[in-house]
Image (cartoon, coloured by chain):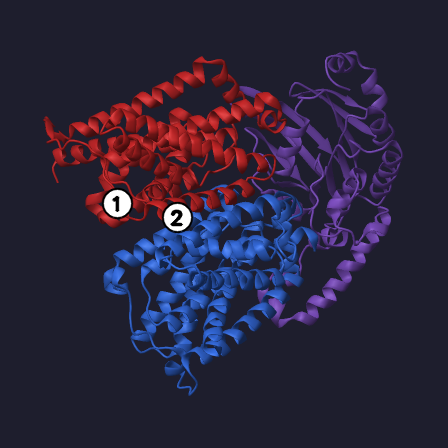
Chain colours: A purple, B blue, C red
Amino acid sequence: MTFAANDISMRFGGFLALDHVSIEMGESDLVGLIGPNGAGKSTLFAVASGFEAASGGRVVFKGQDVTALSPSARARLGLGRTFQVPREFTHLSVLDNLVVAAPGQLGERLVNVFLRPGDIARQRAEIVEKAEGIADFLNLARVIDQPSGKLSGGQKKLLELGRVLMLDPALILLDEPFAGVNPVLVGEISERIGELNGRGVGFLVVEHNLQALSDLVRRMYVMDRGRIIAEGTPDEVLARDAVREAYMGGVV
Amino acid sequence: MEGYLLAVGVIALIYMLMTLGLNLHYGFTGLINFGHVGFFAVGAYTSAILAVHGVWLPLAFLAAVVLAALSAWPLGVLSLRLRIEYLAIVTLGFSEAVRLFIVNERWLTNGVQGIPGIPNLSEGLGLPMSATTTTFILLVLANLAAILVIHRIVKSPFGRAIEAIRDDEEALRALGKDPGSFKIRVFMLGAAFAGLGGAFYAHYITFVTPDQFLPLLTFYIWVAMILGGAGRVSGAAVGTLALVGFLEGSRFLRDIVPGVAEVEMASLRLGVVGLALILLVIYRPGGIMGDYSSR
Amino acid sequence: MSFGYLLNLAVNGAIEGSIIALGALALTLVFGIARFPNASAGDVITVGAYAGYGGQLASGGLMAAGVVSGMVGAAAISLAFYWFVFRKLAGRSAVYPLIASIGAAFLIRAAITFFLGHDQRVYDVPLTRAVAFGPVRVVPTDLYLAAGALAALAVVFALLHMTPLGRRMRAVADNPDLARAGGISARRVMTAMWLIAGAVSGLAGVLLGVKTVVMPEMGWDLLLPAFAATILGTIGNPVGAVVGGLLIGIAQELSTPFVGFTYKIGVGFLVLLLVLLVRPQGLFSGAERVR
């Protein structure tokens, strides 16, 4: 088991956003998380990635209790995330967005900037090669030198994914990868996720586009009002009455 | 005439060091520092006090730079926890706190009466040229060195990281990097440049008082930075020259328009700086050279 | 250091604090509704002081005229800067109106010193002797000041909580998108807010001028304590601003025997720092996230 959210509860004042939620994922798992608006999916992501502290419960990653760890510490361990609204480094080029994400850069220490320029240049060459590879994979090679702020919505989403891939993560929390993306690109993104999963990267995907998600993931959790109400394969889960009811009142 | 131009050049180059530092803070990292004059003051007073007590000038300068950088450390730490608007207020309070300290701790700083008789650079280094010439030459060298250093830094991974912080700090955090240590280092580095400027200032004017270190100077530098183009090294240089050109030009204006007292001139300058800030922010936030959004 | 002495300091601090509270109230309105720290608030207070002085002078010594002209003058300046400057920066990051507000502060200060010089002016107030309430000695003028400040605060609260306009203002404070969406309703709310903030600042200026003297730097000196009070009381919370103002005022006075007069101004800054480090969301935040 690579990742587990154990019995997570989250209280905001009097409001219970997460009610004893538990999720489990194995290595290279490809799991979906759905539910109507306000079900608590974003909150769960925030807790899983460390951007919010839960009121109760533990988060376990690669056998380690990471509940107390900061988001950056979790990312360094291999737990990456993307954001619902892409958060590209607007004034940096696509290439620089990818390059800045590379871990362990000597050139981030000022001493090295002045005393070890050769090593830094060598490291940069490696990093750029990796970044260009990822850009190719995500079909962003054409725009690699453009300021990332000028990309289309779909391209920004791909860039978000590319950035987190620079970390060689074991698990990526994908926040609505298909939202606001044109249908052709949805298929492309879905393929990329599948390929990456084939190479061993696990994914927990929050999505509202149930069709696209069902085609992609092997397993799904359904949340409603802070609780997990169903779990199983996409077909199983979407046939359940409870799940349909939950969505009737919400935006699908 | 050359004497006059050299003198103006000295002031311009001193301000340029400050602008280069502030540009690192805001233009490259997005930190709003409204207390820049505080670092300038720390540098000026440190060098002045040491030099007046006989310390060898290069050492006094070094101490000025180091102390200015150290004084930025608490602000750097605070910048990790404070929202950008709060940081602005706190840094403003910092520079005022420095000034209050200078006013109050008479045993060290001679309070409001200030420290006279600071050795100028020709005396202190035993050089034959006039003080202004020596100061000018050394300032040119200092600025060149500063520009080279900053250029190297912004092209490095460190530079990319601080620009990422400016654009979206949380996203950088999600990528496994802590903005904190970068912010602290940038704060200290930018402060060091301001401190160096302060040391030069003290040994050029040869007389420091707390009144020379008011928030107005911080905002002169802000105008220079925005006017030239924040986040661009050439912007800092161009903006400073434009600012000093205006400040000096206003002196000539006074000669042409009779009956305007120096005090009124000071008011006009203050008003124009205020107006400049407003107009720049509304109509041309990118400045002359364009800011980081057009690089 | 007797209890009576400390009590006196505390009472005087509360009186000063009620003026700081007015400044903080203006700040919290702008912070909560227009969403940026308004660095020109101090100089608007100064405008109020000068306008009030002028009003009193012109009316042959009527304090009431002074109060009215002070509030009107400051409200007018406040509205003018909204209309010509801050309105054009709506929707951008708070950095821009913040910098513009510094520019506004300078512009105001420059105008005042250019046309009216640096000389201190004094309101025409009869000299009164301090009256004793037990161990506490208070000058009657100060009591009127505090009463005036509290009355103004009460009026603003009534406005915010008992009128439709106030409801709309609070709605905009809770939901920034309402402000950004623009439209007549948003414009009206903003206009009302800047007028009220200006009037409140104007009153602060008049009261401060009566208590001390009228000079160009007076409002700017109040800015840091007022900001400290705003943040201490939680941004956007008018009650908090008032409580914060009183606390800061008292803290400043109580610290005087220990840190001396020069550093007294620094106490506001110190409190601000401590609040931001320990509880940046202020004393009065509920279940909301840290702002």
- Say if mark 1 contacts mark 2, CB within 8 Å: no
Question: Where does the image place residue B69, in percent across and percent down from the top left?
Answer: 45, 62
Q: Residue at x 16, y 33 (%)?
A: C8
As shown in the figure, which amino acid type bears the numbered disc 2?
A: Gly
- Does residue A26 appear to the left or right of C51 in the view shown? right
Could you give the CA–CA distance between mark 1 and mark 2, rounded to whole angstroms?
25 Å
Up-down relation of residue C215 to residue A187 (above or below)? below
Q: Quadrant of residue B160?
A: bottom right
**Helix, strand or loop at disc 1?**
loop
Quarter occupied by the C terminus of chain A: top right
Q: What residue would you read off at disc 1?
A: C120
Question: Where does the image place residue C4, in percent across and percent down from the top left?
Answer: 12, 33
- Does residue B188 appear to the left or right of C69 in the view shown? right
Q: Nearer the viewer, residue B178 or A152?
A: A152
The chain identifier of the residue carrying mark 2 reads: B
- Does residue B181 appear to the left or right of B176 in the view shown? left
Q: Quadrant of residue C253?
A: top left
Count of labels shown?
Answer: 2
Q: Residues within 10 Å of mark 1 (few under 14, many from 20)?
A: few
Q: Residue at x 39, y 55 (%)?
A: B266
Question: Where does the image place residue A88, in percent across and percent down from the top left?
Answer: 71, 44
Mark in front: 1 vs 2: 1
Q: Nearer the viewer, residue C69 or A39?
A: C69
Question: Where does the image place residue C207, in percent across and percent down from the top left?
Answer: 28, 32
The chain identifier of the residue carrying mark 1 reads: C
As shown in the figure, which amino acid type bears the numbered disc 1?
A: Gln
- Residue A4 seen: yes
Q: What residue would you read off at disc 2?
A: B93
- Residue found at the far bottom of this picture: B128
Q: Quadrant of residue B126?
A: bottom left
